[in-house]
Amino acid sequence: MGAHRAGPYGPDEAAALAARAGLLREIALTGALDEPAWRAAFEEVPRHLFVPYYFVSRPGGWDRLWSGDPDPGRRRRWLRGAYADAPLAVRVRDGELISSSSQPSLMARMLVELEVRDGDDVLEIGAGSGYNAALLAHRLGDSHVTTIDLEPEITESARTHLAAAGYRPTVVTGDGARGVPERAPYDRVIATCTLPAIPHAWIAQCRPGARILAPLATGLVVLRVTGTPSGRYAEGHFLHTAAYFVPLRGTPARRPVPYRSLGGLPRRAGENELFRFLLALTAGRLDPREALSLWERERRPERERYGVTVTEEGEWAWLDDPAGPYVWPLGPDVRSYGSGAASGESGGGP
């Protein structure tokens, strides 16, 4: 698909294609585009159509870059940013980031980990710019993709961007924590906003064997849904990848704990990303000193050793074994929030 001219100026087609090729090379270095179907999606879906403007942070506020800027230098800067392997802030309100287009290489890793198959029906929580929904629609077809966001202005702009790129998945304005029951059942659920817990509504709207991928704490958890409609549960492990997203709107995020709040713990621990993941995962459940003792006793566990179990009776995170000695309740119950998803700003780490 060729480059689309946006606004009175728009990007030069050759420059846009060259920028997209550069992004593909960068993502390919991570190994996330080894699957031909996803490589084709990233090759053919033009990201710049989904970010006709975005915001760049500066001291004291934000700088807005857009495709129709009369200054050719700023237009070139906009296009370079649109194809940078970085998250882009696309909605800012009262100085607060509420929606972004996620880091493309992390998006690619998440889509690969979703393990979609031809004919799968996918629910995306957090419409954002619409770019991720377009990638899914390219892979599966419009009729198999549903995306939801709380903010009407976000869903309306996502529809506009998707249509400009030639995709028309179902875009719903509503509460992401409640899912989209009228489009259920789903084979896959993917969230682009961080959560305090996994909404049980998602599990109830899944087919047996469905896969759920969602940001939790500062990581990505992958759950497999099993059981019957009257008694579904889900369980799975975290991936190796670090990830930071905007929280599900109306829910308290499990944010990284500031070092100054760690009560004199050794700096080597407070600045260690894996220890901070444990602190975020057990926030309010485990004292930082207890967390440090556990972390050192268990030889500084990687993310993959942690997991999550969700049942009708409750939800908990665990280390190594869901029935083992290290188990922490998750919550609060996101079923109690009348809110929805904001698309997540994401960043990844090794």
Image (cartoon, helix red, strand yellow):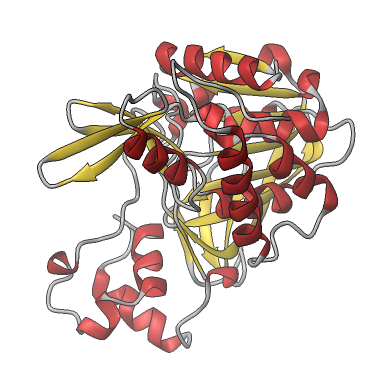
Residue 68 location, quadrant: top left
Q: Which sits in the foreground, 223 or 151? A: 151
Q: Position of residue 197 (x, y in %)?
A: 47, 43
Number of residue marks: 0
Give above or below for 259 relative to 71. below
Direction from residue 229 to residue 45 in the image, left or right:
left
Residue 332 location, quadrant: top left
- Which quadrant does the N terminus fall into? top right
Is residue 119 shown to the viewer in this render? Answer: yes
Q: Which sits in the foreground, 349 or 260? A: 349
Residue positioned 60% across, 72% down in the render: 320
Give above or below for 93 relative to 41. above
Is residue 332 shown to the viewer in this render? Answer: no
Direction from residue 6 to residue 238 in the image, left or right:
right
Q: Position of residue 227 (x, y in %)?
A: 79, 40
Direction from residue 86 to residue 285 in the image, left or right:
left
Q: Residue furthest left?
A: 60
Q: Which sits in the foreground, 5 or 336? A: 5
Give above or below for 19 relative to 149. below
Direction from residue 204 to residue 94 in the image, left or right:
left
Q: Which sits in the foreground, 249 or 51? A: 51
Q: Position of residue 65 (x, y in %)?
A: 32, 33
Q: Position of residue 219 (x, y in %)?
A: 49, 58
Residue positioned 84% across, 51% down in the render: 36
Residue positioned 79% across, 18% down in the render: 143
